[in-house]
Image: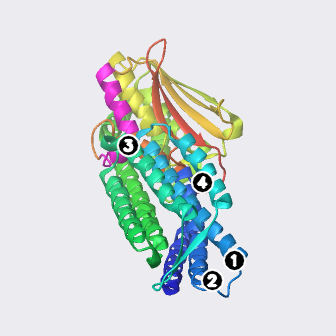
Amino acid sequence: MIRMEIALFLILAFVAFVYFSAGRKHTLLHKTFSQLLIVMLIHLVLDAVTVYTVNHLDIVDRLLNDSLHRLFIGTLVLAVYLFYQYIAILVEEETGKPRHLDIAAKIYLAAAELGVLLLPIHYAVTEKGNYSDGIHANVCYVSMVFYLILCIGTLLSSWSQMDRKKKMAIGVAFIIEICVSFLQAINPTWLISGMGLTLMTMAFYLTLENPDILRAQLVEQKMSMLYLKSQVNPHFLYNTLDTIRIQAQLNDDKQVADLLMRLVDFFRLSVKVDRQMVALDDELELLEAYMELMCYRYPELRCDYDIDPDLGGVLVPNFILQPVVENSLIHGLKNKGYRGRVRIVAKRSKRNHRCMELEVMDTGTGFSEETKEKINDLLLNYAKQAPKLEGNSIGILNVQKRIKLLCGRDYGLSYTDNKGGGVTAHLLLPISEEGWE
């Protein structure tokens, strides 16, 4: 039997090595899974040790045996609690719903761990093997049932909003653990609880936390960005070149050279795709080139900047502002004949000084109720949306996907209405001057 625990430990240790060595942004979800891996490795060590000690009661000191069993069951309870936490955080990230059952989960965890420390331990000695039973051992089964009920309740409350692949992964993991727990209950001498928890961990790793899958998502987003940059709105390119052509016919002056220079600057900066993250100053340089061309084409269009100079070196996802500004022009100022103002703001967040807020405010007509609902749904359910290759929402969808992937799910793009008309796009980003892989 110990051989099984050793094999499970080696498999999970290899998974942990691959997982911890993979480059990733450590979100709350990934930190929880990291904690789960560590607890499971400790639990499997204790599982193997207690399998030996419980079957050698005649030579192992009773106090040592009891202490090891208390640690074994304590780590089991902590592991199933972390399974619940992982699922609850996953559901929260998918749906935006707060984790209402966290308090109950933590109170039970404290009560169960207290019971693990204080309840008496009894060992059953049989011809097929020995095992711990009685009220102390039942803490395992009660804990498993309690946290499974919390997980099922959390999932059912948001079932329709969850991604199908993630629902299937969690469902398969539950079925595995329920089957293993049932077999353990009717055959106490099998001592296979560690196998069930390990298989659940592997199910989550292979379907939800696999670094190869995460890297594939990153490649998908990068390819979407490359496609977006290769298109760069053909209408904008055509109309701008046409404006320059007409201007060249009318007067051969420095303005034409300046326009051509800004156009060259724009495309030179926009094709920098070798880095996922760039300094805010570089991103603003690209945006300024774009807006100078637009303001020249539409003389009654104005653009203002209010940039905190201390944030110039902060890293932001590459090509993140221009699609948002272009969206403001298309949805807001176009209907007013491009008469109005766009204001770009970069400042520290008032709620969290470790975050930065980029704002794109316009004085346009704003969103209709129907458009606002579609945009909000698009941004909220970004994970379920395939990368778009056409349509006006291509820019903001890819902006949202790339922020979430590169910076974490706590950050992203949202919109609010302005009191005086128009809308404001809010981009919440972390303040960091270190690169992402």
Q: CA distance from mark 3 to mark 2?
A: 57 Å
Q: Is residue 119 left or right of residue 343?
A: right
Front disc: 3 or 4 = 4
Mark 3, Cα crowd under 10 Å, few <14 / some 14-19 / many 20+, is some
The answer to whether the residues at label 2 and label 1 have Cβ atoms under 8 Å apart is: yes
- In the drawing, what numbered circle is on residue 62? 1
Return the mark for residue 82: none
Looking at the rendered structure, the secondary structure element under dot 2 is loop
Amino acid type for the residue under numbered disc 3: Tyr
Of the 4 image quadrants, the one containing the C terminus is bottom right
Sequence-wise, the earlier of marks 2 and 1 is 2
Label 3 close to label 4 by CB (< 8 Å): no
Which residue type does callout 2 highlight?
Answer: Leu
Nearest to viewer (mark 2 / mark 4)? 2
Q: Is residue 194 left or right of residue 380?
A: right
* Residue type (three-letter) at the residue carrying disc 1: Arg
Disc 3 target residue: 382
Residue bounds of the magenta highlight:
368-388
Q: Nearer the viewer, residue 149 or 283?
A: 149
Residue 181 sits inside the magenta stretch: no
Disc 1 vs disc 4: Cβ atoms closer than 8 Å? no
How far from the left and from the top, in percent, is residue 34? Answer: 57, 62
Q: Residues within 10 Å of mark 2 (few under 14, many from 20)?
A: some
Percent position of residue 261, x then y: 49, 42
Q: Nearer the viewer, mark 3 or mark 2?
A: 2
Of mark 3 and mark 2, the one earlier in the sequence is 2
Q: Is residue 383 magenta?
A: yes
Mark 1 or 4, nearer chain start: 1
